[in-house]
Image (cartoon, helix red, strand yellow):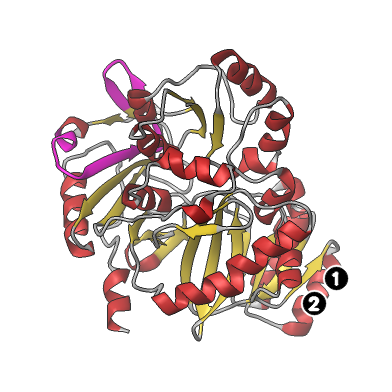
Amino acid sequence: MRILVVGGGGREHAICYVLKKSKHLEKLYCVPGNGGIEEITEVPKDIQPIDFSTLAEFCKKEGIGLVLPGPEEPLVKGIRDVLEEKGIKVFGPDRFTANLEGSKIFAKEIMVKAGVPTARFEVFDDPDKARQYIEKVGAPLVVKADGLCAGKGVFVCDTKEEAFQAVEKLMEQRIFGEAGQRVVIEEKLVGEEASYIVITDGEHFKALPTSQDHKRLLDGDQGPNTGGMGAYSPTPLITKDLRKEIEEKVISPVLKTLAKEGHPYLGFLYAGLMIVNHIPYVLEFNCRLGDPETQVILPRVENDFIELLDATLNGRLDKVDLVETDKACVCVVMASKGYPGSYEKGKKIEGLDKVKQLEDVIVFHAGTKKEGDAFYTSGGRVLGVTALDNDIPSAIKRAYQAVSLIHFDGAHYRKDIGQRYFKYLET
């Protein structure tokens, strides 16, 4: 099979990595790719992830059998709807179901219909009414832009003043444009955050290996929120009983509700959860794999990845056993100085050749560019240094051993990725 992966981050590098191992792969392409992806597959130039007409032309010309979008934007903008009209298969939800991520309000409406546990909320399109509500209910509150904001449209507000400021920024200053035209204001839930990601054909689903992301920039979960500074898999937070609870109270009801709406969900479904008194409350849904969770999940899946995708596309997922390795996996993100704010690009990366000699270590590139034989930084999150080993402590040690061999000017990374594992063992 000829496959085109759409996207250019660490998640897409991990997807390409597992696809390359499949015996069914004839040829692999990725757009726009990055320096590391270029090393393992073909990266056509001058094609952008949301330029659907050019993507369709390329797919027809190259005989692409399947398109696999990594990020949310192409999915929310309808890549599957557009390409499938032209006879090109796409692995991912259609525009309607991708709104689970594209619209916070749509997601809440589906959750209410499905009876899924979620924070109490109200929706506003008038900033004055939003402020009146905040004055009435008080803080703490969470204020969310309805639309996509690249992960930056959620404001956790511990005071009414912070909530008023969030409403002003989103609805009046329009810092995220039309995405803030409407907002969701909801109660702040306090508990343990968890992610649960499944692959689904719309009726059946299989849970991928459990994982936990580290969102904050600094050690000890301090500093600003980022796209994710590292992850580990599996996590003891999600016990066998909690898995059952999540699947029965969240995943199954949502899939059944979407099917009743006439849009069975196909692809990866990511539930961002807050566990409160052993009850999984949904904070958000994502319509794709997480980043950097993918970097620790996919190396632990032992199935031929193309066979897994094919079974999903053809409604045979219930006939497949998803097999995960006993090995644990840890990913440490090396970021540019200044991230998640402004940062410089073009810093030369040293030491990648040394890391290639280490066993069970994979460096997934996120923000890199290849020039000649050298790699340079081109993004905020630069590399996801990923290691497999017999258990989490050993995988942590192996990952940081690899990190110590890599250097670029201003490199920043957390020193405590995976430490939450020990916390959950104690509870």
- The front one of 265 and 165 is 265
Say whether residue 380 is visible. no
**Boundaries of the magenta span:** 354-375
Residue 359 x, y percent position in the rendering: 15, 42
Disc 1: which residue: 129
Query: In this orientation, which residue lies closer to the viewer: 98 or 218?
Result: 98
The quarter of the displayed image where residue 171 is located: bottom right
Nearest to the observer: residue 216 or residue 50: 50
Within 10 Å of disc 1 (Cα), the crowding (few <14, some 14-19, many 20+) is few
In the image, is 98 to the left or to the right of 222?
Answer: right
> Can you name the residue that lies furthest to the top here?
61
Q: CA distance from mark 2 to mark 1?
A: 6 Å
Q: Which residue is mark 2?
A: 133
* Residue 21: % across, % down: 33, 34
Q: Is residue 371 on the magenta stretch?
A: yes
Q: Say above or below: 211 vs 331.
A: below
Is 167 rendered above or below residue 102? below
- Element carrying mark 1: helix
Q: Amino acid at mark 1?
A: Lys
Q: Does the segment drawn in magenta span residue 19? A: no
| 178 on left or right of 416 | right
Q: Are marks 2 and 1 in contact (CB under 8 Å)?
A: yes
Camera-side residue: 233 or 8? 233
Quarter of the figure that contains the C terminus: bottom left
Q: How many callouts does the rendering have?
A: 2
Which residue is at 26% across, 41% downward?
362
Residue 310, can we see it?
yes
Q: Amino acid at mark 2?
A: Tyr
